[in-house]
Amino acid sequence: MPDGASGPQLARAVLDAAKARREAAGRTRRRTATGTGGGERRLRGYSGPGPDPRDPQPLGAVLNRLVKARGWQQPAAEATVFGAWERVVGPEVAQHSRPVKLENGELTVEARSTAWATQLRLLAGSLLKQIAREVGHNVVRKLHIHGPAAPSWSRGPRRVRGRGPRDTYG
């Protein structure tokens, strides 16, 4: 601003300075037309024959963008292990087993019988590869496979204290 300016000259100098600041800020901050809010400029007019951000989007693409933006990839991959167990391990294995718990990259699987538990333990390496191929690497790093849960005889209304059933033949 010029020294000794007053009245209309001072107002003109302030206005020119404000316009210069606005133009400088407009050049450094480019606005995009993605339509995601946050002070971005919206495109006007028709979108034309090519793809445009304003066109309707498939729901899967929108959900994938949302999952990625929120950082939900790991929980979504973990949920896939439980929700799509048959697709992840195959129909035959899924028919005889079910995932029980996934914690710190360690998946606990319960088999329908002890024979299937043994078979799944032998197939653990290939199962880990299948799971990694379907849901991503480092989602499941280790498998804990056990057979069906047997009833516990140590608690209950008809529990008798003592050693329990033993050999009665002498």
Image (cartoon, rainbow, N blue to C red):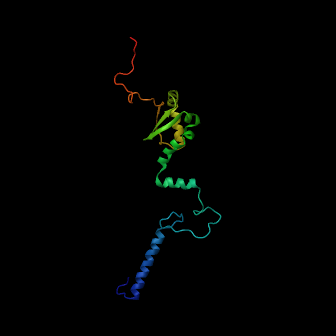
Q: Nearer the viewer, residue 169 or 105?
A: 169
Image height of 7 relative to 37, above or below: below
Q: Which quadrant would residue 8 be assigned to in this image? A: bottom left
In the rendered image, the quadrant that contains the C terminus is top left
Residue 149 position within the rendered picture, expressed as x and y whole percent measured from the top left: 46, 31
Image height of 77 relative to 147, above or below: below
Image height of 123 relative to 50, above or below: above
At x 45%, y 39%, the residue is 101
At x 40%, y 85%, the residue is 11
Please give left or right for residue 113 compared with residue 8 in the image.
right
Q: In the current view of this chain or complex, which residue is farthest to the front?
A: 157
Residue 134 position within the rendered picture, expressed as x and y whole percent measured from the top left: 54, 42
Residue 2 position within the rendered picture, expressed as x and y whole percent measured from the top left: 37, 84
Q: In the current view of this chain or complex, which residue is farthest to the right?
A: 49
Residue 93 position within the rendered picture, expressed as x and y whole percent measured from the top left: 55, 34
Q: In the current view of this chain or complex, which residue is farthest to the top?
A: 170
Count of numbered labels shown in the rendering = 0
**Residue 105 in sight in this render:** no
Q: Nearer the viewer, residue 63 or 33?
A: 63
In the rendered image, the quadrant that contains the N terminus is bottom left
**Residue 44 in sight in this render:** yes
At x 43%, y 81%, the residue is 15
